[in-house]
Image (spheres, rainbow, N blue to C red):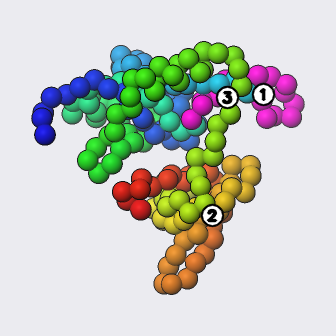
Amino acid sequence: MTNELHVSWYVLHTKSRFENVVYDGLGKKKIEVFLPKVRVKSKRRDRRLMIHVPLFPGYLFVKSDLNPYRHLDILKTTGAVRLIGTKDGPVPVPEDTIASLRIMVSVEQPIATGSRLRKGDRVIVVSGPFAGVSGTFVRYRGKGRVVVNIEALGQHAGVDVDEGEVERLPDILS
């Protein structure tokens, strides 16, 4: 393994609804950041506005060589949680993926996104009253709620949690 540091794009997980705060914070630190947003109709009944929302809620992209100082600087940004990766460290995102996303969000066409969880996925609850509990994703309940099966002592218990509080475990960890 070499000690060379290469500048790459990485996925940064943020606190729920903190994408813009993290985006602004990283920009002030002169760190290149990309927050893909799409136009959607506001869900508030009293409004008929088109608003810009993150394409991937809770995530944005940062470009860095991840030297220890810069890595810590990124993670110390208000609202930043962690860089997505494996036990070996953050996983870079290919440059062409970022280029494709830039094209997608620059066009004012609707973008359909798929569910990020599938039945049977191993997940961990990352915030809220069940934080730290791992289980198996069962289904979406609507209105941002999901059902997760937790196994303990040979028994299963289904808990209803906010989708933003659940993160899929990488296949390596499940």
How crowded pointer 3 is (Cα within 10 Å; few <14, some 14-19, many 20+) is rated as: few
Residue beneath disc 3: 111
x then y, percent, for residue 125: 51, 58
Disc 2 to disc 3: CB gap under 8 Å: no
Which residue is nearer to you in this view: 50 or 102?
102
Name the residue rendered at 53%, 24% in the picture. Answer: 101
* The quarter of the displayed image where residue 85 is located: top left
| Disc 2 target residue | 138
Q: Is residue 44 magenta?
A: yes
Marks 1, 2: nearer the viewer: 2
Task: Assign a secondary structure to mark 3.
Answer: loop
Residue sitting nearer the eye, 65 or 106: 106
For the record, the magenta segment spans: 42-56
Query: On the picture, is 95 further left or further right than 113?
Result: left
Q: Residue 105 carries which label?
A: none
150 to 92, vertically: above or below: below
Mark 1 surroundings: few (<14), some (14-19) or many (≥20) residues within 10 A? few
Give the tally of numbered discs. Answer: 3
> Left or right: 49 with respect to 32?
right
**Which kind of residue does numbered mark 1 sit on?**
Lys
In percent of width and height, residue 141 lies at 72, 57
Residue drawn at (60%, 60%), measured in percent from left and top? 119
9 in the magenta segment: no
Please say if 127 is above or below 130: above
In 3D space, how far apart are the residues under numbered discs 2 and 3 (Cα atoms)? Answer: 26 Å
Residue 41, numbered circle: 1
Report the side of 4 relative to 172 (left or right): left
- Quarter of the image where one finds residue 84: top left
N-terminal of the pair, mark 2 or mark 3, is 3
Most prominent secondary structure in the magenta stretch?
loop
